[in-house]
Amino acid sequence: MQLSTQLQYGDDPIRNAEAVVALEQAGLDVVWVAEAYSFDAVSLMGYLAAKTERIQIGSGILPIYTRTPTLTAMTAAGLDALSDGRMILGLGASGPQVIEGFHGVPYDKPIARTREIIDICRTVWRRERLTNEGLYPIPLPEGQGTGLGKPLKLINHPKRADIPIWVASLGDKNVEMTAELANGWLPHVLMPEKVREVFGPALDAGLAKRAPELGPLQMAGGGILAIEEEMFEPARRLARGMYALYIGGMGARGRNFYNTIFQRQGYADEAKLIQDLYLDGKKEEAAAALPDEFIEKVTLIGPPSFVRERIAALGEIGVTQLLVNPISADAPKVLSQVKEWIS
């Protein structure tokens, strides 16, 4: 099992990158760099490629709507070259509030778009002349544009023609597509006890169509991590605030993917209450309404014996990459300890 973390948002990307250098020395295998309505992920990933030596650098995630598919492929190939083959292309749809509200792009057909983007990226990396029919017609068909477009192939020879693609997905059809086409799956939250019930049928349907050459589907899972007693309560408060934000505020009523998954994990009444409180501006009350049981099962907060049990439970459901957010005054020390447990 590999060890990974999510780079935190912040106004000082250089300081954040320096923290990753220390975590690499502690044994971290992968760092995921988010892109929401923050600084872009690509700039920081390039900087990390120059500052690190071994760690894999993943986009966690690049929204599928904010770049052309070809630019996404070019960017991934460029970062893979700069990092000497350490790039992971993480893709996801983000959500309507960000895509339409910040980028001004219609949020439509996320699954079909992701499928085409994956195919286009792999075609570009193989240096084949690029043509595509569907949502992204390439070249532009007759009657559109100047009519001068022609199929081209990437000038450079990519470091790898098989850069790993991971997809962040939640809904059944999107999870099915991920299991069919992607190298890895980035779920938002995994409760080991509920994974088969919530995601099992979709995963099975996708894996049944998966090409053998893709190999087994990789999977990330974990959560906020604290193994020092004085950090337990701060970590739980952070977890409550984060999950209240996603379950309550990441979307409108009836259009919140995280709320839907929370319901399917067995918390239908709590999901409605948390969303109502959050959207009414009662964020602290929304966080307090999260069941203790939920926080316990989707985080890694507790004494080492408890955390090791939860890591084992994640391994049993197929997690290949332990994705953690360490809460500690000495994060490298904590990650070094966890690395020993999973090695």
Image: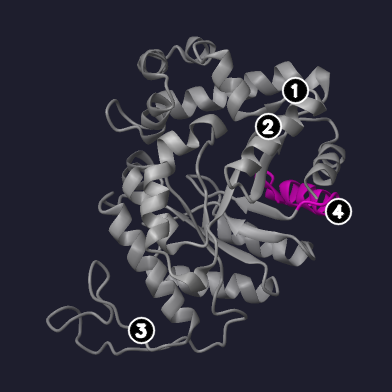
The disc, 2 or 3, on the residue closer to the chain's N-terminal end is 3
Residue drawn at x 61%, y 58% is 58
Q: Secondary structure at mark 4?
A: helix
Select label 2 or label 3 by which is in front. 2
- Against 299, residue 134 (above or below) is below
Between the residue at mark 3 and the residue at mark 4, the CA separation in whole angstroms equals 40 Å
Q: Classify mark 3: residues with Cα within 10 Å, few (<14), some (14-19) or many (20+).
A: some
Report how many numbered discs are placed on residues in the image.
Answer: 4
> Which kind of residue does numbered mark 3 sit on?
Leu
Residue drawn at x 66%, y 60% is 57
Q: Which mark is residue 25?
A: 4
Between the residue at mark 1 and the residue at mark 2, the CA separation in whole angstroms equals 10 Å
Q: Secondary structure at mark 3?
A: loop
> Which kind of residue does numbered mark 1 sit on?
Gly
Q: Is residue 15 magenta?
A: yes
Q: Position of residue 310 (x, y in %)?
A: 68, 32
Residue drawn at x 80%, y 54% is 24
Q: Are marks 1 and 2 in contact (CB under 8 Å)?
A: yes
Q: Which residues are magenta?
A: 1-28
Residue 78 figure quarter: bottom right
Q: Which mark is residue 310?
A: 2
- Against 19, residue 155 (above or below) is below
Select label 1 or label 2 by which is in front. 2
> Which kind of residue does numbered mark 2 sit on?
Arg
Task: Report the residue marked by disc 3.
Answer: 130
